[in-house]
Image (cartoon, grey):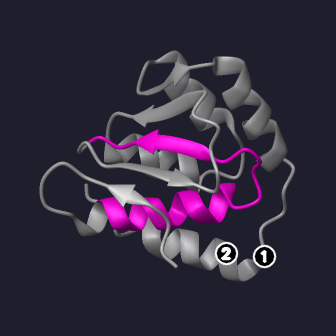
Amino acid sequence: MEPETRRRGPRRGSARAANIVLNRVFAAASPGIRYRLWDGTEGTVGRPDDSFTIVISDPDTFRRAFSATTTKPLAEAFVEKRIDVEGDLFACLRVGHQVEPATLRWRDKLAIWRHLRKVSR
């Protein structure tokens, strides 16, 4: 079953690739997350409690934030307002703390790398 993704307008490969990356990264998070991408695509990972939505402003920010081995690019993008959180920031941080120490399997890392390359430039 493919994760939920909604889009106003035609569906693009870039948004689908981003959805796959987010599902690999946040698969174990509880509650899940709700997100909105630069092209208006909205989706969820897991079962979000609707307390927050992560908003990513552009594909370059997405690639930098999710290709890094640390959370530093994600934090920098938030400070620079290229990534925003609508709603409860502390609930978002609690979810982030769940996935930060997670160790991804090599298959997950390879899939993330492969799909990050498909996020449009």
Residue name at image x 23 percent, y 45 percent: 39
Taking 35 as reference, is 52 left or right?
Answer: right
Q: Tell me, for residue 108, which label it has, or none.
A: 2
As measured in the structure, the alpha-carbon distance from the residue carrying label 1 to the one carrying label 2 is: 5 Å
Residue name at image x 56 percent, y 56 percent: 67
Please identify the residue farthest to the left as the structure is shown: 9
Disc 2, SS: helix
Please determine whether, in this image, residue 29 is positioned above or below residue 35: below
Q: Is residue 115 magenta?
A: no
Q: Is residue 20 magenta?
A: yes
Residue type of the residue flagged with mark 2: Asp
Work out whether residue 103 can be spotted: yes
Please state the horizontal and vertical placement of residue 116, each as a whole percent of the image.
44, 64
Taking 118 as reference, is 104 left or right?
Answer: right
- Mark 2 and mark 1 in contact (Cβ < 8 Å)? yes
Please determine whether, in this image, residue 45 is positioned above or below residue 92: below
Q: Residues within 10 Å of mark 1 (few under 14, many from 20)?
A: few
Please state the horizontal and vertical placement of residue 22, each as a whole percent of the image.
55, 57
Disc 1, SS: loop
Work out whether residue 119 can be spotted: no
Please state the horizontal and vertical placement of residue 111, each as a whole percent of the image.
56, 77
Residue type of the residue flagged with mark 1: Arg
Please state the horizontal and vertical placement of residue 17, each as a whole percent of the image.
40, 67
Residue at the spot of label 1: 105
Q: Nearer the viewer, residue 121 or 43?
A: 43
Q: Nearer the viewer, residue 16 or 33?
A: 33
Residue name at image x 50 percent, y 66 percent: 3
Q: Which residues are magenta?
A: 15-38
